[in-house]
């Protein structure tokens, strides 16, 4: 596991739920009611609990020095992070972890391993 994690790393999981907390606390986008709904929280908990122990390979979000060789996901994550924090503020935390998960899954589909 030199360039990836097996399953979602615990810090990424924590960052996601911290972002969800800020969205609910500040009622960003009027989502507090939906986020605080017990069924939604249960579904998020089950999904992220599975991701923590899943066999999916999640790339290590280290800075990419090369676009080739499958490192484009790290570059996209870094490029999107800056405007995300400017426009979404704390909500960017949850958004970026979701983007990280999607980019990791796309990388796994791309490489087939």
Image (spheres, rainbow, N blue to C red):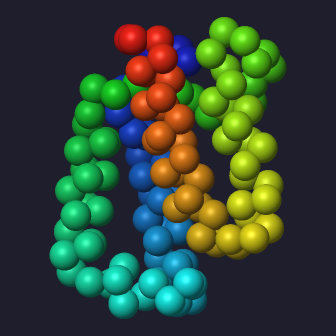
Number of labels in the image equals 0
**Residue closest to the eye, 47 or 111:** 111
**Residue 11 in view of the camera:** no
Above or below 104: residue 67: above
Compared to 30, does 108 lie above or below? above
Residue in view at x 20 percent, y 56 percent:
46
The residue lying at 26 percent from left, 73 percent from top is 40
The structure residue drawn at horizontal position 26% and vertical position 83%, both measured from the top left corner, is 37
Q: Is residue 8 left or right of residue 103?
A: left
Task: Tell me residue 63's x, y (percent).
Answer: 74, 30
Q: Quadrant of the C terminus?
A: top left
Between 68 and 8, which is closer to the camera in this rendering?
68
Point out residue 99 in the picture as x, y percentages from the top left corner.
54, 47
Question: Residue 33: horizontal and vertical position, in percent?
Answer: 36, 90
Q: Where residue 94 sits in the image (x, y, percent)?
A: 52, 61
Say above or below: 36 vs 83.
below
- Location of residue 40 with respect to 32 vertically, above or below: above
* Residue 22 appears in view: yes
Q: Answer with left or right where residue 44 lies relative to residue 65.
A: left
């Amino acid at each position: 596991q030199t360039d990836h994690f097996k399953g979602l790393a615990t810090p990424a999981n924590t960052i996601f739920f911290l972002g969800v907390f800020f969205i609910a606390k500040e009622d960003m986008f009027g989502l507090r009611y939906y986020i605080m709904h017990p069924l939604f929280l249960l579904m998020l908990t089950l999904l992220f609990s599975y991701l923590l122990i899943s066999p999916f390979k999640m790339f290590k979000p280290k800075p990419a020095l090369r676009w080739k060789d499958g490192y484009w996901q790290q570059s996209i994550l870094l490029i999107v992070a800056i405007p995300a924090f400017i426009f979404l503020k704390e909500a960017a935390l949850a958004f970026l972890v979701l983007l990280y998960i999607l980019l990791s899954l796309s990388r796994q589909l791309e490489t087939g391993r």
